[in-house]
Every structure is written in C-alpha cells, then in structure tokens.
Image (tube, coloured by chain):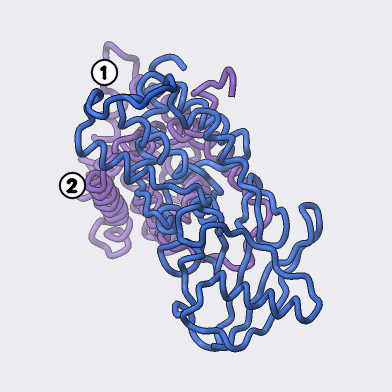
Chain colours: A blue, B purple
Amino acid sequence: MKLTLKIWRQSGPTAEGAIHTYQLDDVSPDMSFLEMLDVLNEQLNDQGEEPVAFDSDCREGICGMCGLMINGEAHGPEVTTTCQLHMRSFTDGETITIEPWRSDAFPVVKDLVVDRGAFDRIIQAGGYVSVNTGSAPEAHSVPVPKDDADRAFNVATCIGCGACVAACPNGSASLFMGAKVTHLGLLPQGQPERDERVVNMVAQHDHEGFGGCTNIGACTAACPKEIPLDVISQLNKDLRTAIKHGH
Amino acid sequence: MKGARASRTTIALKLGMAVSGILFLGFVLAHMYGNLKAFAGHDAFNEYAEHLREIGEPMLPHEGLLWILRVGLIAALVVHVYCAVVLWRRAARARGTHYVMKKHTGATRASLMMRWGGVTILLFLIWHLLNFTIGKVNVQGGATNDPYNLLVDTFDVWWLTLIYIVAMLALGAHLHHGIWSAAQTLGWTGTAAKRQRAKTVGFVIALIVTVGFSLVPLAVLAGIITK
C-alpha cells in the first residue's frame, strides 16, 4: 500500500505545531497502525529527520496509551485501540490525517503525545475504595448479585485511553467518570464512599477544564471498550443523590 | 478536591437545564392544545383565551394564574439560558485547539444543533411575544384586540407562516435531543432499554409538537381557517 500521511508535528508543549505531509510506500495491510508509524520513523531516521513521537505500551489493546485521532475519529475507523487497528482498514493511496487528542486538559507533550495526568487526578479524587489491606478475604463473604458483578466488570474494562474526551464535541470526560462511578457503585465495597466519590471526581473533572456532557453519544461510539452511555446516566443519578444527601 | 460541592459542578448546571426544560415542555404542550382550538372557530378560540385569564377567580385576581405561570416560565428561561451559556463557554475552553479533521461518529444532527438551535428558538420567542403578547403586531394593519383575527391576519402572510414553520422545526429538533438528554441527565436511563425508550418518547413528542403547532398556520394559509 502507498499512503499519504498528514501528521501533527509539535516540538514541545509550548511550541507552535503544524501538519506535515509524508509519503510512505510498501505498507503491508497486515501491519498494525503503530507498526506503520514505526516504518515511517525508520524512514525519517534514515533521512536524518526527527521521528514522530507517539505513545504506545502494551500494543495489545489493554493499556490505553496509544490514542490517536485518525481521519477525525478517535482510534480510527474501527471499534478498537490504535494498536489493534490494522492497515487493511484503509485503502491503497489513501490520505490519512493523524492528530493528537485535542483537549486543554490533555496538553500536548510532543507531536502526537499528550499528558493524560488529568485522568489520574480524577481517579485520585475518588475513583477507589478504601479497604484494610492484609490477607485476601474469603470471596463469598460479601455476596454480589451475578448481574451486578457482570455489569461492574464490563464497565471496569475502561482503560482510561481518553478517546471519549477526544471524540466529545464538548471535551467532556463524563464517560470515563461514569464508568468508574458505575463500577464501584454496583459493588458493596463501593457504598460507604459513594457520595463523596462522585462529588470529588466531578469537581476534579471540572477543575481540570473538561467540558460538560450534552449526551451526544460520540464518546461511546469512539470507546474501544464499548462502555455504554448508561454509565453517564448513573453518574448523573449518583450526583443528584449526593445533592439530596446534602453534599 | 477538598470541600467540593455537588451543587457547583457541571452536572448541577445540566440538572438546571433538564428541570427548566421539562417546565418548558409542559408549557409548550398546553400552548399547542390552546392553538388547536382555532379549528373550533372564532368564538371557541377567543373564549379559551379569555378563560385562561379567569382560571381560579375569585380566589385569584384576573389573570392571576397566568402571571404565576409567566413568572415561573421567566425563571425557567433565566436558568435554562444561564446554564447553557456557562456550559457553552466551558465546552469552548475545553477544546481551545480544534481538530484539522473531525467526524461526528455516533452523534445525531439534532444533538449537534442544540446550542444554535436554542439561539434560534430564543430569537423566535422574542418575535413571537412581540407578535401576539406584548406588542400585538398585526402586519396587515387590522385589529389586534381579537386573538382569533390577529392569528388569521398573521398567518395569511406567507413569510410569517414560514418563520413559524422554521421555528417549529428548530423546536422539534431541540426537543428530539433535549427530552432524552434531560432523562439521561436526571439519571432515568440506566439501561439500554430505558435509553431507547427515552429516545423514542423524545422523538414522538418532538413530532407531535412540530406538527401540532404547524397545523394552524398552514391551515390559515390554505384557507381552512378563515375569519
């Protein structure tokens, strides 16, 4: 495959960025998207140019590091992470535009790399349960209904990649917060801190500069883990309940 | 965040929009019912208009209930517009740098038109109040103290009918997304089935409102409703 790549290049956090165009020949349809970028970087190295900086880690779709905006879609045209996207999803001769996540809460570090530390701070604000550590408790000592356990597990699959924020026209992180609030809110261990959790997470979210949700649904369409929009309803319900409880 | 208050969050602003929006919806449905009285003729329509001013008498003064509703609606409008402006500015700041290329996968057109659609409805509302309530403008120069005749005189003018139809399409689009969005904001759509139900209800009500309000102007223009 021959490709024309239009890639956002920015040498540092405060530097002015711009789209640069590159030609890449001999791309195999079986390459992953990141392997294609690896090939581009080898080519750039050979030409003595600075390689394109992009994030990646596990390359098996479970760590959430590799988010890229590809042709205007977070993680590209398939429902998966960028590392699990393959070049067979594109056509020979295609022009592909690659940009970093655009959110003022995710500042660009370099080229396509953004700092998603805001997500860590939201989790630190309340996305946890406080338990005494020690030996593991007997698994059946706290019964959890099967449906709740399944649903909690499904929404706990969020890998914090930030695609929801990147896709949202408002730059909101509601799907990310909703996934965590729903996950912990479904389990007995999550109940004691339930009100403080939602209030502190949403307050941190607002403080980081994310936008408000308008229930458009672009987040869930972009989510590689298919977190459903229901979790935002749960998030809103938990916050409303916290208001009722005087928080 | 130490000392964070739930009532100071973006979700609290969204709750403000949802609750004020539901008040508007109740008003809009009642308003539509009143408009359809035009099909019952001159006397029925004007009697209905007069009766609105007499509800609750003598417990309430003349136009008493009407003013209670007006104050409530103005308060809802202030809340709705205030929350919308704050959230709009927040959203603009949240993405200071725009994408070179952006697709709106998973978004309905109605959901992306909420803000400018809302501005359209607000501008229409100002004209509408000047037309029928505050100013009572009769572009044909006829009498303005007879609600039914003012209605017929207004919608006999094709471009006025067009303005109203466009506004009702904007209102329909706003409700199509707004109703389900309010349900989601209030936390009533916690499952896929409930979400689908809320979206269906939103679409059906939006359709009823748009068609229901458009019938009278179109009927006047078509000569079905005459003086």
The chain letter for the residue carrying disc 2 is: B
Residue B146 in view here = no
Count neighbours of disc 2 (C-alpha within 10 A) and say few if under 14, some if 14 to 19, many if 20 or more.
Answer: few
Q: Alpha carbon of mark 1 to alpha carbon of mark 2: how far?
A: 24 Å
Residue drawn at x 68%, y 51% is B96
Across and down, in percent, residue A116 comes to 61, 46
Earlier in the chain: of badge 1 and badge 2, it is 2
Residue B137 in picture, x, y percent from top left: 48, 46
Q: Nearer the viewer, residue B198 or A44?
A: A44
Relative to A226, residue A83 above or below:
below
The image's mark for residue A143 is none
| Furthest residue toward front | A135
Q: Amino acid at mark 1?
A: Gly
In the rendered image of this protein, does residue B143 appear above or below residue A102?
Answer: above
- Please identify, in this view, whether the residue under mark 1 or under mark 2 is nearer the observer: 1
Q: Of A141 and A240, which appears nearest the observer? A: A141
Q: Is residue A205 left or right of residue B14?
A: right
Q: Which residue is mark 1?
A: B56
Q: Which residue is mark 2?
A: B40
Tags 1 and 2 in contact by the CB under 8 Å rule? no
Where residue A195 sits, quadrant-wise, is top left
Where is residue A192? Give x, y as percent. 38, 18
Three-letter code for the amino acid on which mark 2 is drawn:
Ala
Q: Is residue A184 visible?
A: yes
Q: Chain of mark 1?
A: B
Q: Is residue A42 rendered to the left or right of residue B38? A: right
